């Protein structure tokens, strides 16, 4: 498995993965449960620079497929950014949503200055439970916590015990609770 910075060419794949992680939240953004429209919404922002879902903020994990073309397959995606930049990165999304979908859109701040925030992490379903998420988190911990001496933070739904166990296993600790888009979340940091 190779973990690399995402490129513009990864846009459509990244959108599919981000929807795995936050499908219901995107439906709230666009005010309807429409998978194709939700994916188009994400593609619009992933391919643009300087917003929280931009390909610039993503890493992808890929493997070589066992086939005659020796193609690589992206099996996991993580989107993260400096929490101090949340308002700047979120502004184009808020403006777009208010203009096109929901005039009253004003989400809670899920992060803040002082942490690199993991907005989304998703592993292709057929590769879940095989340690891919752990390896991706270990890569991020090495890059940001060990090498750059920064905290990493994320939110996980209160009811999602499996995800909480994964994060705890690699060293994340609960530092509080938050509500995001009407969902109760645990704020974890390492």
Image (spheres, grey):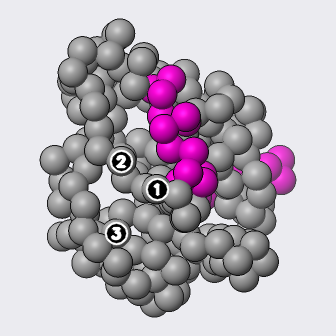
In the image, is residue 4 part of the stretch drawn in magenta? Answer: no
User: Residue 53 in the image: x percent, y percent?
Assistant: 55, 38
Q: For the point 71% across and 59% down, which residue is it?
A: 62
In the image, is residue 82 part of the stretch drawn in magenta? Answer: yes
| Residue that numbered label 1 is attached to | 112
Up-down relation of residue 61 to residue 57 (above or below):
below
Q: Quadrant of the N terminus?
A: bottom right
Q: Nearer the viewer, residue 52 or 60?
A: 52
Left or right of 140? Residue 2 is right
Report the span colored magenta: 67-93
Tell which tag, 2 or 3, sits nearer the viewer. 2
Q: Nearer the viewer, residue 33 or 178?
A: 178
Mark 2 vs 3, N-terminal side: 2
Mark 1 vs 3, N-terminal side: 1
Label drawn at residue 187: 3
SS assignment at label 3: strand
Crowd class of label 3 (few under 14; some 14 to 19; many from 20; radius 10 Å) = many
User: Residue 174 in the image: x percent, y percent?
Assistant: 34, 80
Q: For the point 65% across and 72% down, which residue is it?
A: 150
| Residue that numbered label 2 is attached to | 109
Crowd class of label 1 (few under 14; some 14 to 19; many from 20; radius 10 Å) = some
Tell which tag, 1 or 3, sits nearer the viewer. 1
Label drawn at residue 36: none
Q: Quadrant of residue 163?
A: bottom left
């Amino acid at each position: 498995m190779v973990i690399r910075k995402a490129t513009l060419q990864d846009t459509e794949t990244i959108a599919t993965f981000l929807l795995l992680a936050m499908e219901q939240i995107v439906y709230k953004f666009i005010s309807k449960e429409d998978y194709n429209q939700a994916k188009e919404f994400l593609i619009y922002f992933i391919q643009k620079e300087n917003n929280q879902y931009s390909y610039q903020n993503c890493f992808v994990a890929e493997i070589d497929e066992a086939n005659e073309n020796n193609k690589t397959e992206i099996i996991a995606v993580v989107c993260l950014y400096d929490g101090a930049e949340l308002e700047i990165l979120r502004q184009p999304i808020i403006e777009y949503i208010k203009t096109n979908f929901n005039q009253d859109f004003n989400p809670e701040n899920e992060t803040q200055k002082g942490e690199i925030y993991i907005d989304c992490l998703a592993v292709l379903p057929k590769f879940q439970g095989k340690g891919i998420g752990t390896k991706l988190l270990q890569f991020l911990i090495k890059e940001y916590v060990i090498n750059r001496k920064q905290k990493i933070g994320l939110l996980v739904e209160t009811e999602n015990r499996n995800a909480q166990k994964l994060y705890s296993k690699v060293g994340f600790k609960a530092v509080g609770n938050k509500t995001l888009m009407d969902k109760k979340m645990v704020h974890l940091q390492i």
